[in-house]
Amino acid sequence: MKKFDKERALLAIAAPVLAVIGALIVTALVLLATGKEPFTAFHVMINYGDKTDSQVYILNKATTYYLAGLAVAVGFRMNLFNIGVDGQYRLAAFFAAAVGGAMSIPGIIQVPLIILTAMVVGAVWAAIAGVLKVTRGVSEVISTIMLNSIAGIVIGYFLQDGRLGVLDKNANMVSTKPIPSGSHLFNFSTGGGAVDGFIVLAVVAGVLYWFGLNRTRFGFDLRAVGRSQSAAEASGVSVKRMVITSMLISGALAGLVGMPTLLNESYDYGTDFPVGIGFTGIAVALLGRNNPVGIAVGAVLWAFLDRAANGLEFEGYDQELVGVIQGVIVLAVVIAYELVRRYGLTRQQRQVGAELAAAAAHKQEVTA
């Protein structure tokens, strides 16, 4: 058993190592093809990302990416593709901002209320796709993509002056009423800026995700459905209930994605609110293999590459280069993990075959 555990650990380490090496090689070839020196580019990225203000930026970005990755990973664990995290978190942040701006109550009550509003809105919006899947057989990929567009339309309708929006004539921008200063979430002040306090709640969300999936009956049922729906049904698990429940949890986590920006930075929802984080969460979840620690590493890596793009641009490199690197990393991770998985499976089959052959030979010796 100890030998098997050691081999499994080596295989687990080999996958990300191969992915990083493969991504670096392909990126270097791309740089050479464009007439750029790869080692200089890598040096610029590392130096720029190592600055104190860059580290603060990376932590704040990684917090939102981590939450998005968790939201996507819940669905991935049971073969559900929640592509609608982007719409879910934007709609959740919008209504949470509207609720927060309409009230003036103690922050100890208002902050949890804002967060709860966001989680409920995200969960309800995601549940629509779950209900359509179990009642009408609609693919969650199609329904969540369509719900992303509908979410944008709903926000556009209500985010107008005279409805839930307020026009700022100086900035020529519409936003919700600002959340009172007493309901702003705490920050961690550093020499390079302020780290969003929501990073603490993101860590808590990661711990709850790990505990729920690995130490509860619900997590066991969820993973069972992800491996084989027919086998799960035969053991008494309601697949339809699990689909809806998983989408509710995924949507609730998606509702948290916009909270670091809302409660620590902007304090309102405007036309400049960040978009596209939900799609980044898909890549982060793939990088982290749906593991909370792996997702955290993937989120930090993605945030580092976002920051490094600015450093490369200052040095005369094309900013799109970072997009190429990010795409190559995702492909390299998927390919590397698949190669390692197949190698591990083949190795186990050989070990089982060798043990069976040894047992057969021993049996023949005994009967002889």
Image (spheres, grey):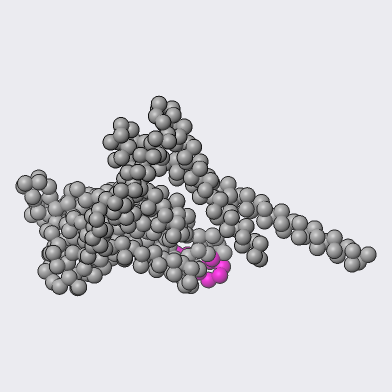
Tell me if residue 18 can be seen.
yes
Magenta-highlighted residues: 232-240
Tell me if residue 92 can be seen.
no
Residue 200, picture quadrant? bottom left
In the picture as drawn, the residue positioned furthest to the right comes out as 368
Residue 164, picture quadrant? bottom left
Numbered label tally: 0
In the picture as drawn, the residue positioned furthest to the left comes out as 169
Front-most of residues 191 and 257: 191
Q: Residue at x 37, y 61 (%)?
A: 250
Residue 336 percent location from the top left of the image:
54, 46
Please say whether residue 70 is one of the residues in the magenta stretch. Answer: no
Residue 199 percent location from the top left of the image:
31, 62
5 relative position to 289: left or right? right
Residue 151 percent location from the top left of the image:
26, 52
Q: Residue at x 55, y 55 (%)?
A: 12
